[in-house]
Amino acid sequence: MGCQRGEQEAGLPALEAGAAALGLKLSPTALDRFRRYQALLDEYGARVNLTSVRDAEGVQRRHFVESLALGMALREAGRLHGRERVIDVGSGAGFPGVPLAIVWPGLHLTLLEATQKKARFLEALVGELALPGAYVVAQRAEDAAHEPLLRERFDLALARAVAPLPALVELCLPFLRVGGRLAAVKGSHLDAELKEAVRATARCGGGTAQLLALPGGGAAGPLRVALIPKVRQTPPELPRRAGLPQHEPLR
């Protein structure tokens, strides 16, 4: 699916300013992909509820720049070098995974999204942007995590606004190899969620979280990243069947 020439040539001032503040210089190829990304969000957003943020500046700040801020936080923590196997759990409209793959195109990215309309958007997006090594899996995390090709295969699992941490560790840790990390972007409730998730984290094979500040914060206030290591294999019965991690978190 192609985009109009005018859309491709449009400027992205909020993105460029935000990237510069993070110390990132976006290449012409990356900028072109971000332009096409925003054009596809506009096009599909008229038919599919992809994101509540619809204005161009909001998309650039809230989605593009915040995703890149996560990438820089992971890079500074020594967890993002550009060749990792990454799974974006509950990817929605592709955040934060796709912006990271645009800037670090060597990533092997799996976009996991259960809502079929959003998954079809992601498939169109990956095709339009010609992202090497990016794939879409249209499946619930509870089911996908039991697939041999996906279970305990990834270096990083990303999650942004997916679920409270006690449910999130059950949904995400099974995808990680021992030594991998779950990077969960959270706001002001992170400390409380970490306490509530202690037992669930341990049961799913996770260790003690490292907390990272998200450079530049977020549109709704300061954001942090809970970087949770995978220290042992997840028991084979986890995650439980669809819906249980959210409705009956492990205690």
Image (spheres, rainbow, N blue to C red):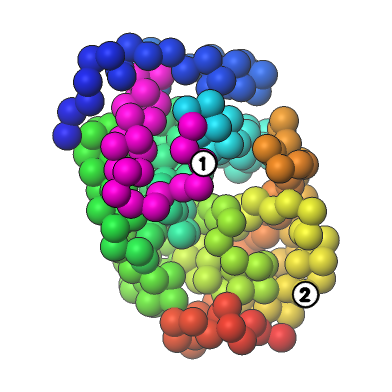
The residue to which callout 2 is attached is: 196
The quadrant holding residue 112 is: bottom left
Can you tell which mark lies on residue 214? none
Front residue of this view, candidates 101 and 45: 45
Q: Position of residue 198 (x, y in %)?
A: 76, 74
Question: Label 1: which residue?
Answer: 53
Mark 1–mark 2 distance (CA, rounded to whole Å): 30 Å
Residue 231: image quadrant is bottom right
Position in image of residue 40 (x %, y %): 31, 35
Mark 1: amino acid: Val
Q: Is the N terminus in the top left, top right, bottom left or bottom right quadrant?
A: top left
Which portion, as a residue range, is magenta?
A: 31-55
Give the number of the mark in front: 1 or 2.
1
241 relative position to 58: left or right: left
| In the image, residue 236 above or below residue 114 | below
Q: Amino acid at mark 2?
A: Glu
Indicate the secondary structure of the residue bearing disc 1. loop
Residue at screen point 38% across, 60% down: 113
